[in-house]
Amino acid sequence: MSDDNRPATVADVHEIAEAMPHVTVEWGSGDNPVYQVGRKSFVFFRTPRPDAFDPETGERYRDVIVFWVESQGDKEALVQDESTPFFTTPHFDGHPSVLLRASRIHELTRGELAEIIQDAWLSRASARRAAAWRAAQEAGPLR
């Protein structure tokens, strides 16, 4: 099995986000990492909030990861597709992001997770940085 086809892990979130160019890590409340490019967050680990909770127990989710998306259409495609573990809450209405519980991250492959994180980075990076990253991807690995 290629690495891209194996189930994703939380460690992959950190590895992939940190590998993107010009990334800095800030620390939010609860010592949760916030991955940024150009001082703009693109992935972060959220503290438990009253809007994301288990409908049966009422307990707040403690494992929510937030990923920026390019557009409202991208968000809707992800949260409306029942084959993905992405969701949103009313708190994020109108916000270009999707949520994912870390406990469900294995439902994505590492390749799918990488694409989500790369798209999140692209949605927040400057046009110059995004163009340079895309050009490097098209050029492929150095030989």
Image (cartoon, rainbow, N blue to C red):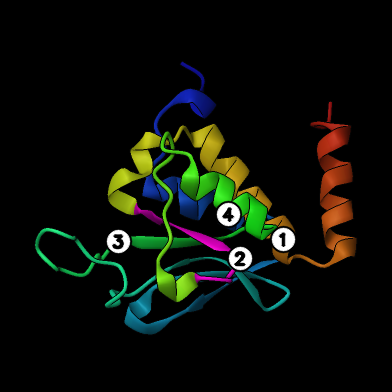
**Residue 123, located in which quarter of the rendered image?**
bottom right
Pair 3/2: label in front: 2
Q: Amino acid at mark 4?
A: Lys
SS class of the residue under badge 2?
A: loop
Disc 2 marks which residue?
A: 96
**Residue extending farthest top:** 1
Disc 4 marks which residue?
A: 75
**Residue 134, located in which quarter of the rendered image?**
top right
**Residue extending farthest left:** 57
Q: Are marks 1 and 3 in contact (CB under 8 Å)?
A: no
Comes first in the chain, label 2 or label 1:
2
Comes first in the chain, label 4 or label 3:
3
- Quote the CA–CA distance across marks 4 and 1: 12 Å
SS class of the residue under badge 3?
A: loop
Q: Which residues are magenta?
A: 93-101
Comes first in the chain, label 1 or label 3:
3
**Residue 138, located in which quarter of the rendered image?**
top right
Horizontal side of 88 relative to 55 (left or right) equals right
SS class of the residue under badge 1?
A: helix
